[in-house]
């Protein structure tokens, strides 16, 4: 995790949430993992109906400030993020000088 103090209030009272989850709207007591990106992509293997698809999703962890509640999300798989950008499924922000 890259931050050691809250970017909003500068507090160092921080908490980590390794697996960010949300309530599943269609299920009593159900939860689902929160992802920044999720889609079906090509698997690279052929099946009997053609090329197989697989779920591509970018899971996140969170660091939350105990003083003000500010939450920062962190992608867990940066190689997948770069791969998604190469496939133009997410947009890489141009570097500024
Ligand atoms: Zn804070």
Image: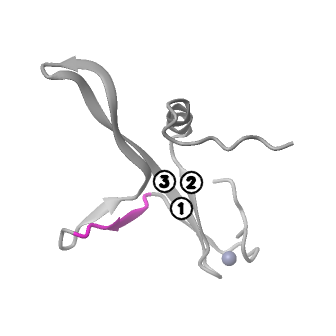
Q: Is the distance from the Cβ of mark 3 to the nearest ligand 1 atom less than 8 Å? A: no
Which quarter of the rendered picture does the C terminus lie within?
top right
User: Residue 7: horizontal and vertical position, in percent?
Assistant: 73, 68
Residue, x 68% and y 53% (percent of image)?
A: 2
Q: Is residue 92 above or below residue 46?
A: below
Q: How crowded is mark 1: few (under 14 residues within 10 Å), some or many (20 or more)?
A: some
Is there a contact, CB below 8 Å, between mark 2 and mark 3? Answer: yes
State the residue lying farthest toward the left: 48
Is disc 3 surrounded by few (<14), some (14 to 19) or many (20+) residues within 10 Å?
A: many
The residue lying at 23 percent from left, 67 percent from top is 30
Asked which secondary structure carries label 3, the reply is strand
Quadrant of res 86: top right
Which residue position is annotated with label 3?
60
Asked if labels 1 and 2 touch by Cβ distance under 8 angstroms, the answer is: yes
**Which sits in the foreground, 49 or 44?**
49
Q: In which quadrant of this rendering is ligand 1 seen?
A: bottom right
Colour scheme used in the picture? one colour
User: Which residue, given by chain and number where applicable, does mark 1 sit on?
Assistant: 62
Q: Which of 61 and 86 is in front in this view?
A: 86
Q: Which residue is disc 2 drawn over?
A: 74
Q: Does the residue labelled 1 lie within 8 Å of ligand 1?
A: no
């Amino acid at each position: 995790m890259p931050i050691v103090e809250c970017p909003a209030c500068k507090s160092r009272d921080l908490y980590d949430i390794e697996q960010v989850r949300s309530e599943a709207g269609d299920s009593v007591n159900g939860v689902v993992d929160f992802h920044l990106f999720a889609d079906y992509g090509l698997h690279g293997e052929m099946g009997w109906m053609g090329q197989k698809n697989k779920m591509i999703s970018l899971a996140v962890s969170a660091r939350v400030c105990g003083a003000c509640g500010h939450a920062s999300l962190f992608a867990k798989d940066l190689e997948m993020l770069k791969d998604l950008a190469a496939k133009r499924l997410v947009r890489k922000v141009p570097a500024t000088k």
